[in-house]
Structures are given as structure tokens and as C-alpha cells.
Image: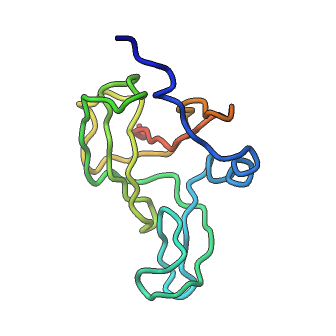
Amino acid sequence: MPIQKEIYRVVTRSCAHSWRKRFERYALVGSKCDKCNREYYPKRCLCPNCHTTNLFDVALARKGTILSTVTDYVSMMGFSEGIPYVRAIIQLDNNGPCVTSDIVDCDPESVHVGMSVEMLVRRVRRESNGNLQYAHKWRLVI
């Protein structure tokens, strides 16, 4: 039985919403607490450390260090390209928060804990409203 294309249809918001969120598509944007100076990703409205609501948007570091990795040989529906996936927990430089993302442009066997990585933005697919969907990916720093 052939797979229907409608299964892979991505439900998105309006073009206006995409325009307002355009900076977050191309940069790693998190929150920083005005009281205790901790950074968080993704953005938050409340600091879990000191419970204040005085947080502001901040561009986070685009480099980091791998804390943990896993290689995934089974893809999610609609993401069959690029198997195997190497996913990692990355500690951002300058004591930034940890992020979870894919490691790209490398042999899965060559990725190890403690390696330096840098962020890049990759096109993932086209959304149902015609906009391109982007995602943060990471590659090894050589």
C-alpha cells in the first residue's frame, strides 16, 4: 500500500507568525535571568532557580562541548534522509545551558564525548504554508 503524502503534511501557523519568529530560526535564542544571571534554552517565562519573571532574550553561544551522544538507526516518519542520526547533549561555551541536537557532516563512529562542536542552521523541509522550516544542527570543530 503506498504511503499518502498527507501523512507528512506539517501544520504551521501564519506567515505573520513565521515573520515574527524569524530571528529564532537562524540564531540560538534563549532566556537570561536578570536576577541570578542564569541562561536557559529553550526560552522561559519564569526562572526555575530564583522564581523571578524578569527574564530577557539572549543570543546563546554557537559553540560547545559534547556531553553525551547516541546514534539512532531508525528514522522518524518523514525524516528518512541522513540515517544514522547522531544526537548529542551539548554544553554551550561560557557555562551556557545544555541543548540536544543532531551532529551532522561526520562519520557517526568519530563522534565522542568531549569534542568541540559549532552550530549551523539547516533547512529541514517546507511547511504547509509554503515557508521553509529550519533547524539548529551541530558539526565537529576540526
The quarter in which the C terminus is drawn is top left
User: Nearest the camera: 136 or 113?
Assistant: 136
Please tell me whether residue 100 is drawn above or below residue 110 in the rendered image. Answer: below
User: Nearest the camera: 62 or 54?
Assistant: 54
- What color scheme is it? rainbow
Residue at position x 38%, y 38% from top?
103
Where does the image place residue 23, in percent across and percent down from the top left?
68, 52
Where does the image place residue 68, in percent across and percent down from the top left?
25, 51
Where does the image place residue 48, in percent across and percent down from the top left?
42, 80
Tell me if 58 is positioned left or right of 90 in this view. Answer: right
Tell me if 102 is positioned left or right of 59 in this view. Answer: left
Residue at position x 41%, y 33% from top?
104
Please tell me whether residue 9 is drawn above or below residue 18 in the rendered image. Answer: above
Where does the image place residue 62, in percent across and percent down from the top left?
52, 52
The quarter in which the N terminus is drawn is top left
Residue at position x 28%, y 30% from top?
108
User: Nearest the camera: 75 or 56?
Assistant: 75
- Give the residue furthest to the top: 1
- Give the residue furthest to the front: 1
Residue at position x 44%, y 42% from top?
138
Tell me if 30 is positioned left or right of 142 in this view. Answer: right
